[in-house]
Amino acid sequence: MTDTEFKAPESTENFEELLNEQFGDKGIVGSVVKGTIIALSDDYVTVDVGLKSEGRIPLREFGQNPELKVGDQIEVLVDRYEDRDGNIVLSREKARREEAWAELEKSMNAGQRVNGVIFGRVKGGFTVDLNGAIAFLPGSQIDIRPIRDVTPLMGISQPFQILKMDRVRGNIVVSRRVVLEETRAEARAELIDAIKEGAILDGVVKNITDYGAFVDLGGVDGLLHVTDISWKRINHPAEVLTVGQNIKVQIIKYNEDTQRISLGMKQLENDPWQSVADKYKVGEVYKGKVTNITDYGAFVELEDGIEGLVHVSEMSWTRKNVHPGKIVSTSEEVEVKVLEVDPEKRRISLGIKQCTPNPWAAYVEEHPAGSIIEGVIKNITEFGLFVGLTDEIDGMIHLSDIAWGKSGEEAVKDYEKGQEIKAKIIDVDVEKERISLGIKQLDENNAALALENFKKGDVVKAIVKSVDEKGVNVEVEGIAATIKKADLSKDKEGQNPEKYHEGDVLEAKLTSVDKKNGKLGVSVKALEIEEEKKTLKEYSASDSSNTSLGDALGEALKKSAS
């Protein structure tokens, strides 16, 4: 057909038939054809597709700042025809879309990835431009794990996997997650082959827990335990790590059977404990910061990675039985003295009280044993009186040292809390921080008077006042004394203090009489041995051959009991 032979059809239907004849059996509408640009304006591009009629395409369909000129050949889609004059509506955008669909179908059928750009959000996911074709990216398919901010992923070209295509409905569903999982699996296989203990790798903090952090090594996760993050004390991994942080780690343990990987960060730094013995000498004083407080003491950081323990007993000379938190506080800077260094066990024992003068030593220097002091009764207990000597130091008066000739329980009734008294220092132990006092020692003459009627070897009756694990506390004619376990009986069974009760009367022998200090030595065992010897002597002197040793002992015991 020549140009002179073309005549405008009398109807739209005839025009369509003519166009279909020109473009073959597939028809014209919806077809992609090649055309030539014959004119350019600010808003339109006029294209000749080989017919008498020309088509105009909005310039915006060519994107921003298109490089077009008259004479360029381009592919366009015949969208529709408008009237009997043969004006054709063309579309460059739809032509590109048709091209894209054809290429995408090939890629999907071949299982190949396609490149696209995430450019918008829609309900349930995102929109992706696949070189002209618009696809839907479900929110669950954007990454392997949930991500809070997808902004860094938008506007950049990246690979996707086509999950589903429906050309009739114009639907395409893609996944970025599938691509990541495949890439991760490939990287994991390569990484596992290369994993060995001691290897240093780059990783990304994936998750943080109370006991450590999980690190993504590029397809394989490893556990970085809180104790392997730093040489210094860390209470929680979040103090130094954040999710998404890039870090360098060393593989410190790898279990091939379970594929569990243990990681470390501090292993990449020098161990400060290697030189601790040279830096911190016993007896020297250093400054440190309190990092942690427990019931048994406080940990003090001397430098990064080096901590020592100040035991509660080494915190104060005078404040006893108080929680360490009442003496020091976290983050407080303190002076400490090194008491012991053990690099192998990674331990340093420190003392705070050693950095100040010992008030016990100072007091004893001014008030040696034998000195007469004045004080206020601060507390009355079942075993004696506690007397305040200074604001920091207390002394104790045992029940047995309150009065001559009285039991402790009787004597203590004469005193009350807050009462001012005089006492004599009878014993001092600076190391154990103890000062023993006595009231009765103020009148030494009463000691001899109280024991005037007693002599060693006397048989006495001892009344049980109390029982403890060491023996039985008794009273002999108003004088307090103690019968030790071993002196309760010559038999093992009778040496158990629990067999005796308050009020029991025991017959015993005085083994010592200390008139100067007003003390009696009392023993049931000594009396039993003496009576046994006496019985044996009587038996030996007896002429009766019919009396056995057992009978003689039995008779003696009966007499003793009566």
Image (cartoon, helix red, strand yellow):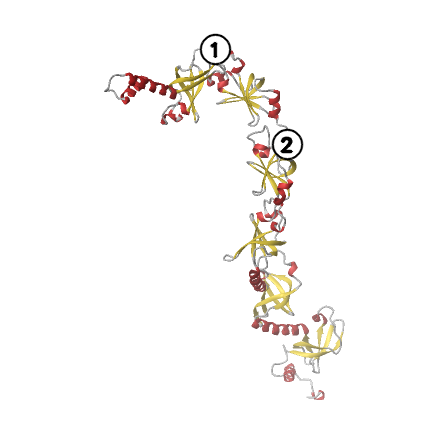
Q: Could you say which is closer to the camera, residue 237 or residue 279? A: 279
**Which residue position holds label 2?**
355
* Percent position of residue 103, x then y: 61, 73
Q: Sort mark 2 into few (<14), some (14-19) or many (20+) by Cα contacts within 10 Å.
A: some
Callout 1, which amino acid? Leu
Residue found at x 63% / y 28%: 357
Name the disc covering residue 449, or none. Answer: 1
Callout 2, which amino acid? Cys
Q: Is residue 341 above or below residue 209?
A: above
Give the position of the C terminus as an image quadrant. Answer: top left
On the image, which quarter does residue 306 sit in?
top right
Q: Could you say which is closer to the camera, residue 399 or residue 122? A: 399
Secondary structure under the numbered disc 1 in the rendered image: helix
* Percent position of residue 62, x then y: 70, 71
**Outermost residue to the left:** 546
On the image, which quarter does residue 550 sit in?
top left
Secondary structure under the numbered disc 2 in the rendered image: helix
